[in-house]
Image: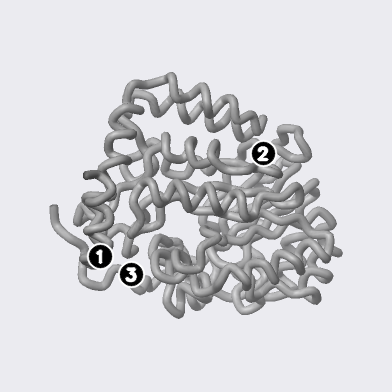
Amino acid sequence: MALPSKTYKKVYDCSRQDLVSTWTGEELLNGKPERSFTVIMRTRGCSWSLKSGCTMCGYHAASNPSIRSEALKLQLEEALSGYDGEAVVKIYTSGSFLDEGEVPGDVAISILEAFDAKRIIVESRPEYVNTGILESYADSAPQLEIAMGLESSNDFILEHCINKGFTVEDYRVARDIILANDCHLRTYLLLKPPFLTETEAMEDLASSITAVSHPQNTVSVNPLNVQKDTLVERLWYRREYRPPWIWSLFQAILSSEIRGPLVISRAGVGSKRGAQNCGSCHDVLLGNIDDFNLTGDTEILKRSFSVCDCTREWAAQKDISALLHYRGSHEILCDRYAGYM
């Protein structure tokens, strides 16, 4: 199989100014399933991506560095043509909605005021969260929810596996500002960033859920899917990265302490680039994820383990992966072999 170029992240010359995508679905809101409307807007892109970028994120492909406010307003009109009063509206920019260099303040307010929704969800990196902007935007959307991609509660993983560009403390400061301004909070956590074994990834997700789960915080668990032109894709092509098992996803959640709402992202699940099992059980497990997201009932995840015998292969690979995952330290390698002897 041919490898990608040495530069794992391409610089896109994207001149498109139209909306990326919209779709409808269901979302659990205040314990009740509600219809949702998701909007992906094309902006200049994530500020961190322009400087460096996360190892797994390929959303820069949909950005246009030269886009202007007028184009964003036209995208809003396009989105509104497909909006049918859904109670939950998710407005994503593949960057930070609160970054006024990406979405100017007057445009952001126009977007928030355009939807008659019970809850509007936008995303931001923590450095753009401040009281002034939240007060301004919350006036336009009283049920505003800010989603932040923490990914992991472990600073070492954030720096060396994800290249996240901020620390857990940065997240905590932004979290406190969000809650102090009576906005809702959503935190994205990642299952299996690169350079971790399957077991390490499960342990990190479980500990991260336990660290951030709170009645005022909706945790969204995102099993990594291999996106184009990223470091993770390069590793994947070289067979140095395998997306997580769906069993690992379920087990990590069941091993954590859940003290508030938690949902699972279906993005890529069951595909060759996403969380996967043997293949024959994917449809059933995707249905179980949908049921879990609308109920929060962890018994659904527990019962899933009786669906397919590939749990045995998962268990075997999980146990032996530490022996095969050499990071270049003789001491680490000896310690890992010692554990199996």
Residue name at image x 56 percent, y 54 percent: 208
Residue name at image x 46 percent, y 77 percent: 50
> What is the CA distance from the residue labelled 2 to the residue labelled 1?
47 Å
Residue name at image x 50 percent, y 50 percent: 205
Q: Which residue carries the number 3 mark?
A: 9
- Regarding residue 76, the answer to whether it shows in the image is no
Left or right, residue 74 beside residue 44: right
Query: Which label sits on residue 27?
Result: 2
Q: Secondary structure at mark 1?
A: helix
> What is the CA distance from the residue labelled 1 to the residue labelled 3?
33 Å
- In x, y percent, where is residue 290? 56, 31
- In x, y percent, where is residue 54? 43, 67
- In x, y percent, where is residue 218? 68, 48
Q: Secondary structure at mark 2?
A: strand
Q: Secondary structure at mark 3?
A: loop
Q: Which residue carries the number 1 mark?
A: 331
- In x, y percent, where is residue 17? 52, 66
The answer to whether the residues at label 2 and label 1 have Cβ atoms under 8 Å apart is no
Question: Residue type at mark 1?
Answer: Glu
Q: Earlier in the sequence, mark 1 or mark 3?
A: 3
Quarter of the image where one finds residue 247: top left
Left or right, residue 251 beside residue 308: right
Question: Residue type at mark 3?
Answer: Lys
